[in-house]
Amino acid sequence: MAIERTLSIIKPDATEGNHIGDILGMVEKAGLKIIAMKMMHLSQAQAEAFYAVHAERPFFGELTEFMRRSPVVVSVLEGENAVATYREVMGATNPANADEGTIRKAFAKDVGENSVHGSDSQENAAIEIAFFFPASQLPCAPLFHGARRARRPPGVAAQLGGRAGPAHADGPGGPRPPHRLAAGPAASP
Ligand code: ADP
Ligand code: MG
């Protein structure tokens, strides 16, 4: 299955209710990796722009007012089938219809104040991620999913005291190098 990215927003009702940690825990237990995250207070203009697709719906005013009521936690999730996986973890839009074990079943108040947003397609995920995160704030994919860690050439390892091994900060080889965002298929010889 493909490694995808999706955008998550923990909405104001959930941040007000101190459910950020519980929700992020459910995300991680589902096998999704949080690869970028920030807490922010949306402006009215940002809320309207993000939900522009619903501008004609009768609940648009209520929705945008709700989304700017308190801070939200915006994150990018990465994993196998991430868009559909996260929609499953979220549960149905209306918590009355949400399955047991889903975020909305556990925390949502009603169809409007329903605790989380998740992208509904890969195409929209790309648009929504770009809305909140410039490419420079995102790691190059895939970071976590079976990718082999880069190893330093022996000469570089020797200069660093002979420590060969992973180049990432959580390995014995020292600090993690900057992401090489420009690197991709086009950069291959
Ligand atoms: P989802 O968030 O599950 O993708 P939609 O894209 O249909 O659902 O709607 C976007 C958001 O608009 C919902 O999550 C909810 O906050 C709000 N919303 C949807 N339907 C209603 C409604 N009937 N009344 C009030 N708010 C609604
Ligand atoms: Mg939607």
Image: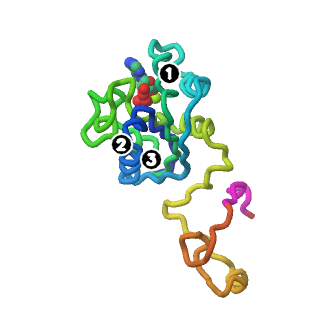
Q: Find out whether residue 117 is within the magenta segment.
A: no
**Quarter location, residue 14:** top left
Which quadrant does ligand 1 occupy? top left
- What's the CA distance linking mark 2 and mark 1? 25 Å
Q: Residue at x 69, y 55 (%)?
A: 181
Residue 19 point in image, percent of width and height: 37, 42
- Could you tell which of marks 2 and 1 lies nearer the N-terminus? 1
Q: Nearer the viewer, mark 3 or mark 1?
A: 1
Q: Residue at x 47, y 34 (%)?
A: 120
- What's the CA distance linking mark 3 and mark 2? 12 Å
Residue where numbered disc 1 is placed? 65
State the residue in front, 127 or 2.
127
Residue where numbered disc 2 is placed? 89
Q: Nearer the viewer, mark 2 or mark 1?
A: 1
Question: Would you call the spot at circle 2 few (<14 residues within 10 Å), some (14-19), or many (20 or more)?
Answer: many
Q: Secondary structure at mark 1?
A: helix
Residue where numbered disc 3 is placed? 81
Q: Name the colouring of the figure.
A: rainbow
Q: Is residue 141 above or below residue 100?
A: below
Q: Residue at x 60, y 38 (%)?
A: 132
**Quarter location, residue 182:** bottom right
Amino acid type shown at disc 3: Asn
Q: Secondary structure at mark 2?
A: helix
Number of numbered labels in the structure image: 3
- What's the CA distance linking mark 3 and mark 1? 32 Å
Amino acid type shown at disc 1: Glu
Q: Which residues are magenta?
A: 179-188
Main secondary structure along the magenta-highlighted residues: loop
Q: Secondary structure at mark 3?
A: loop
Residue 43 point in image, percent of width and height: 59, 28
